[in-house]
């Protein structure tokens, strides 16, 4: 009995050890804290943290490579300062599938947002006009309606400055290299990897001939849905994402635009999404992910909260930051309506900022502040004068004087 217990205990220890090891979900991100991209902003991923269950990726969604211009698009990229959470041990969702909604559905490996194929408008048959927001059918195809504003990297900024790709991020990797397996170029929020265009033809080994992964969605001639007839008189088939119907066996990939296969990074096998293009290297629907995720999605929040005991991963090695102070920058100070706080990469997670007036009363609180992220301190409505801003976390507390101008 003692020997059996010892062996079980040893197996548990080994299991925990393996779970704590780094893997592609941790190492595939393009980290950088010095190189700049558009607007002089720090580019790519600023911080990767992990524990046995999750990876937390901090990014401002600005790539290192040159982007722009964006014809007919009034928006410009700006740092998003987000933290996204990815499960390290993803599993298939066997229940109600999660839709890949509008906004960020994952991150490219350089920290840029991935958007679904829609542009956020649907056809309202009762008014014979496009309406904002997703509908039950006849949702507009972003490639058709927004493609004119894509730059040479096939990306563009959303309102609010979130630079993103709906389709193949062609500046991130070589989408014309059909002789090698494409690299991991991102992760979906369910934790499964996203590869470029090319994979092994075989689904049973991580070797052999390479082929372009083909979508199994085909353009349908069916022009009727539950929400009414297609606006085909003005908008031809292909203008709506609903014009494409999944047809098993039509291509290499399933309804989610992925498949179970073996890859260089996952020689034991994994489910993986693939970017899809046609034989002319033009984006092919559904472009990245299908209408639903394959796996269980823990969180689609772009403001995830790390546990505070996570390991920091860097390309120079794995380090655990010593937490004996809290580093930050505040500007402007004095301030009038807003002050902006940048949290240094060496900080711990989940720092709490508290602003007190001269009477010691709490007037503002910012919870769960994360390293490498910028935060806005709203001073509107406060009396002019001197305030004290304290930062607390992991038993450390520092205080800064803030001057509010009239």
Image (tube, rainbow, N blue to C red):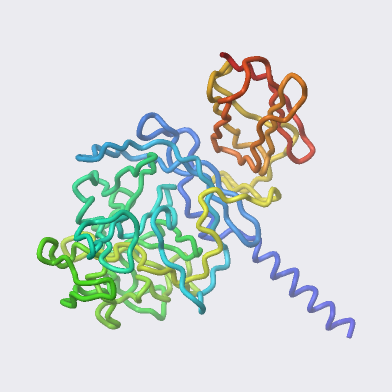
Kindly identify the residue that appears in the image at 56 percent across and 44 percent down. 316
Residue 405 rendering spot, x and y as whole percentages: 58, 14
Residue nearest the observer in this picture, 95 or 251: 95
- In the image, 121: left or right of 94? left
Asked which quadrant contains residue 263, the reply is bottom left
Kindly identify the residue that appears in the image at 40 percent across and 36 percent down. 78
Name the quarter where the N terminus is drawn. bottom right
Observer able to see residue 182? yes
Residue 201 rendering spot, x and y as whole percentages: 31, 76
Kindly identify the residue that appears in the image at 51 percent across and 41 percent down. 46
Kindly identify the residue that appears in the image at 34 percent across and 60 percent down. 134
Observer able to see residue 119? no
Residue 65 rendering spot, x and y as whole percentages: 33, 40
Residue nearest the observer in this picture, 158 or 108: 158
Instruction: From this view, report whether residue 403 is shown above or below residue 185.
Output: above
- In the image, 96: left or right of 138? right
Asked which quadrant contains residue 209, the reply is bottom left
Residue 26 rendering spot, x and y as whole percentages: 54, 55
Residue farthest along the front direction in this orientation: 126
- In the image, 199: left or right of 372? left
Name the quarter where the C terminus is drawn. top right
Residue nearest the observer in this picture, 239 or 350: 239
């Amino acid at each position: 009995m003692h020997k059996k217990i010892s062996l079980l205990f040893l197996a548990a220890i080994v299991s925990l050890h393996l779970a704590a090891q780094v893997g592609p979900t941790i190492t595939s991100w393009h980290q950088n804290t010095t190189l700049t991209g558009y607007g002089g902003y720090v580019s790519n991923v600023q911080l990767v943290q992990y524990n046995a269950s999750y990876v937390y990726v901090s990014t401002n969604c600005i790539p290192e490579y040159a982007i722009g211009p964006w014809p007919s698009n009034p928006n410009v990229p700006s740092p998003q300062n987000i933290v996204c959470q990815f499960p390290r041990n993803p599993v298939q969702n066997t229940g109600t599938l999660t839709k890949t909604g509008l906004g960020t559905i994952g991150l490219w490996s350089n920290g840029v947002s991935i958007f679904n194929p829609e542009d956020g408008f649907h056809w309202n048959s009762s008014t014979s006009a496009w309406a904002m927001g997703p509908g039950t059918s006849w949702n507009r195809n972003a490639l058709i309606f927004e493609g004119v504003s894509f730059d040479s990297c096939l990306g563009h900024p959303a309102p609010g400055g979130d630079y993103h790709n709906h389709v193949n991020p062609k500046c991130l990797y070589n989408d014309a290299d059909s002789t090698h397996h494409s690299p991991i170029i991102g992760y979906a929020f369910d934790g499964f990897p996203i590869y470029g265009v090319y994979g092994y033809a075989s689904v049973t080994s991580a070797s052999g001939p390479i082929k372009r992964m083909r979508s199994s969605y085909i353009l349908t001639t069916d022009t009727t849905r539950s929400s009414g007839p297609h606006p085909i008189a003005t908008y031809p088939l292909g203008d709506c994402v609903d014009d494409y119907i999944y047809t098993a066996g039509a291509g290499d990939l399933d309804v989610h635009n992925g498949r179970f296969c073996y890859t260089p990074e996952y020689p034991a096998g994994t489910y993986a999404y693939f970017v899809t293009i046609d034989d002319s290297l033009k984006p092919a629907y559904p472009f990245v992910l299908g209408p639903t995720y394959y796996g269980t999605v823990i969180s689609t929040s772009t403001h995830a909260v790390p546990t505070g005991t996570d390991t920091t991963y860097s390309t120079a090695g794995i380090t655990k930051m010593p937490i004996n102070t809290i580093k930050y920058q505040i500007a402007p100070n004095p301030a009038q309506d807003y002050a902006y706080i940048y949290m240094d990469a060496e900080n711990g997670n989940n720092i709490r900022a508290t602003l007190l007036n001269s009477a010691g009363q709490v007037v503002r609180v910012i919870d769960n502040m994360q390293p490498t992220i910028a935060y806005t301190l709203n001073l509107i409505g406060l009396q002019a004068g001197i305030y004290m801003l304290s930062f607390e976390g992991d038993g450390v507390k520092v205080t800064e004087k803030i001057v509010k101008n009239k």
